[in-house]
């Protein structure tokens, strides 16, 4: 068996499910440099769901014709959320997602842990979860990136 290649997606919408740290690395890479107003991030305690409506850069499309697509990042089995440097619900605060990381509880046989969402400017949201259960789903057609270029990270 060989690994899938980006070009094999043939422009189809992304629909991914992550249930472990290895799966999450793929989702994190695809979500890197996604932007959203803080008002497009919601935690519904009754449903145990954290949802973010992202304007995701399509890394899988390469950078020859930079594109973005609206995507829903949904985390279930969430028992609590806390943040640092993030103003929840503020439509004027634009967040840039840098990475997603899973930190297991560390106890033998325990599936719980924390999902860390790291944002540019030292922003952090941490969701405590009974288990890692996350989906990333494109919900619109891709469109040309307004900037006309791919995000870059100076080292």
Image: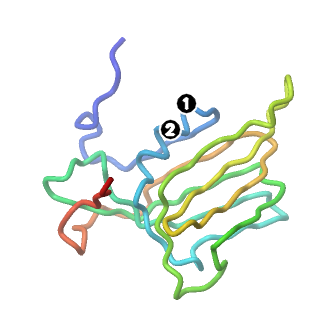
Query: Within 10 angstroms of label 1, few (less than 14), some, or many (20 or more) residues?
Result: few
- The residue at which mark 2 appears reads as 25
SS of the residue under disc 1: helix
- Contact? badges 2 and 1 (CB < 8 Å): yes
Query: Within 10 angstroms of label 2, few (less than 14), some, or many (20 or more) residues?
Result: some
Q: Residue 149: percent from the left, percent from the top?
A: 19, 64
Q: How is the image coloured?
A: rainbow
The one nearer the camera, 149 or 131, is 149
Q: Is residue 19 left or right of residue 73?
A: right
Give the vertical position of 107 relative to 74 (above or below).
above
Q: Is residue 80 left or right of residue 119?
A: right
Residue in view at x 37 percent, y 50 percent: 13
Q: Residue 49: percent from the left, percent from the top?
A: 73, 58
Q: Is residue 132 left or right of residue 25?
A: right
Q: Residue 140: percent from the left, percent from the top?
A: 38, 64
Give the vertical position of 106 relative to 142 (above or below).
above
Give the Cα distance between marks 2 and 1. Answer: 5 Å
Question: Within the image, what quadrant is residue 104 found in?
Answer: top right
For residue 140, which numbered disc appears in the image? none
Residue most toward the front? 155
Count the marks: 2
Residue most toward the left? 64
Residue most toward the top? 1
SS of the residue under disc 2: helix
Residue in view at x 61 percent, y 85 percent: 90
Q: Is residue 3 left or right of residue 126?
A: left
For residue 22, which numbered disc appears in the image? 1
Residue in view at x 58 percent, y 65 percent: 52
Q: Residue 51: percent from the left, percent from the top?
A: 63, 62
Residue in view at x 52 percent, y 88 percent: 92
């Amino acid at each position: 068996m060989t690994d899938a290649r980006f070009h094999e997606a043939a422009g189809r919408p992304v629909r991914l499910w992550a249930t472990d740290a290895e799966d999450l690395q793929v989702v994190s890479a695809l979500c890197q440099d996604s932007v959203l107003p803080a008002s497009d991030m919601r935690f519904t305690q009754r449903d145990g769901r954290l949802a973010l409506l992202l304007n995701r850069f399509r890394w899988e499309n390469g950078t020859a014709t930079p594109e973005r697509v609206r995507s829903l990042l949904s985390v279930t089995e969430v028992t609590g959320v806390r943040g640092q440097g993030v103003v929840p619900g503020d439509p004027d605060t634009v967040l840039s997602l840098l990475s997603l990381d899973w930190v297991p509880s560390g106890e033998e046989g325990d599936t719980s842990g924390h999902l860390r969402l790291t944002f540019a400017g030292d922003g952090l949201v941490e969701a405590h979860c009974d288990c890692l259960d996350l989906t990333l789903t494109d919900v619109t057609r891709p469109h040309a990136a307004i900037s006309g270029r791919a995000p870059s990270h100076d080292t």
